[in-house]
Image: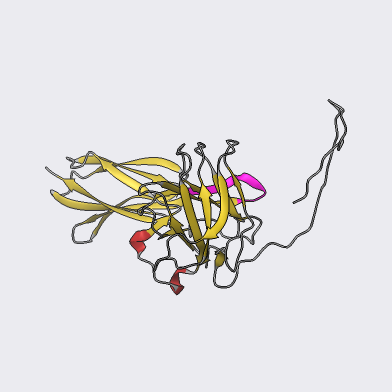
């Protein structure tokens, strides 16, 4: 850390000081080959934490309070929440940009105070906090270790250099203790993880209304990133019926009108494909 204190120990008021071109060359930090970013025993964090100025949050390293098959580590990180809804801690800043073309699975061990607490994962460009990606999940354990997973394959590769977490995100409850350990960014092909337990940082959502419908419906979908989007209709046997969209879409909500007056009653599926996610939903035509 470098800090500058103009007029140190002076008592002047209102004097203007100007500064420019302050630089220090430093190589980017590089995670180990096994993807381990942090475990509080062999790898310590380049850490800072914040709590919106309420001054009641705290972060420290202590003995693992609940050793289990999920996490038997000796040392873990502990975070005490304050009344701020946007508090958290950065565990890595100015790291080598994440190569998401290969290392796209983030594994985090968390011990939350309750089931159903919001936990935010965030990656950010360290020089500019406005360039960031955030994803929030809910915990499934209480005072017990669980491993959570984030798929960051949709993030622009070799761009983000900061990793942060926000326990109890948007909650204003004080003195909730969270524990965190063994943060890794790994190649998902080198390790088995149940796909149903992986949270995609970028995911497509879609719905159609009305459903059931006769004879037409609107298919609405949200895309979080600019991408070519293809929307196709299939019958229950998997035969492709029609392609109703195939082109570039900007982030946001989009709607497509689908007229099924030439089709028989029954179950159909629509598939929304982007470069980073695919969603398939069922719809019912009732004449």
Left or right? Give the position of 287 relative to 273: left
Give the camera-side residue of 38 and 33: 38
In the picture shown, does residue 220 fall above or below 152? above
Residue found at x 78% / y 58%? 25
Residue found at x 57% / y 40%? 51
Residue found at x 78% / y 46%? 3
Q: Position of residue 199 (x, y in %)?
A: 40, 56
Question: Magenta includes 126?
Answer: yes
**As drawn, which residue projects farthest toward the top?**
14
Q: Which residues are magenta?
A: 125-135
Q: Position of residue 41 (x, y in %)?
A: 57, 67
In the picture shown, does residue 133 fall above or below 172? below
Q: Position of residue 218 (x, y in %)?
A: 28, 40
- Colouring mode (rainbow / by chain / secondary structure / one colour): secondary structure
Q: Which part of the image, by quadrant, shows the C terminus?
A: top left
Q: How many marks?
A: 0
Left or right? Give the position of 221 relative to 52: left
Question: Magenta includes 211?
Answer: no
Left or right? Give the position of 177 relative to 138: right
Q: Main secondary structure of the magenta part?
A: strand
Whether residue 81 is visible, yes or no, is: yes
Q: Position of residue 83 (x, y in %)?
A: 50, 36
Give the camera-side residue of 56 and 29: 56
Whether residue 225 is visible, yes or no, is: no
Residue found at x 64% / y 55%? 93
């Amino acid at each position: 850390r470098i800090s500058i204190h103009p007029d140190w120990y002076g008592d002047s008021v209102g004097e203007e000081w100007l500064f420019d071109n302050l630089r220090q060359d430093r190589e980017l930090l590089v995670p180990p080959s096994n993807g381990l970013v942090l475990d509080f025993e062999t790898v310590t964090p380049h850490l800072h934490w914040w709590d919106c100025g309420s001054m009641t949050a705290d972060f420290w390293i202590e003995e693992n309070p609940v050793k289990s098959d999920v996490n038997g580590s000796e040392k873990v990180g502990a975070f005490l929440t304050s009344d701020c809804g946007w508090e958290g801690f950065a565990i890595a800043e100015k790291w080598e940009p994440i190569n998401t073309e290969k290392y796209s699975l983030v594994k985090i061990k968390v011990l939350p105070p309750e089931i159903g607490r919001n936990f935010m994962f965030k990656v950010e460009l360290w020089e500019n906090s406005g360039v960031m990606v955030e994803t929030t999940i809910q915990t499934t354990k209480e005072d017990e270790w669980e491993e959570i997973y984030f798929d960051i394959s949709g993030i622009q590769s070799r761009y983000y250099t900061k990793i942060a977490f926000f326990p109890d995100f948007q909650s204003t409850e004080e003195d909730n203790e969270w524990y965190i350990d063994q943060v890794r960014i790994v190649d998902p092909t080198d390790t088995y993880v149940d796909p149903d337990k992986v949270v995609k940082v970028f995911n497509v959502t879609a719905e159609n209304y009305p459903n059931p419908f006769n004879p037409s419906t609107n298919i609405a979908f949200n895309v979080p990133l600019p991408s070519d989007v293809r929307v196709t209709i299939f019958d229950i046997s998997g035969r492709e019926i029609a392609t109703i969209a195939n082109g570039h879409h900007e982030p946001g909500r989009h709607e497509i009108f689908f007229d099924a007056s030439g089709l028989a009653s029954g179950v159909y599926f629509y598939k929304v494909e982007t470069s980073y996610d695919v969603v398939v939903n069922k719809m019912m035509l009732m004449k």
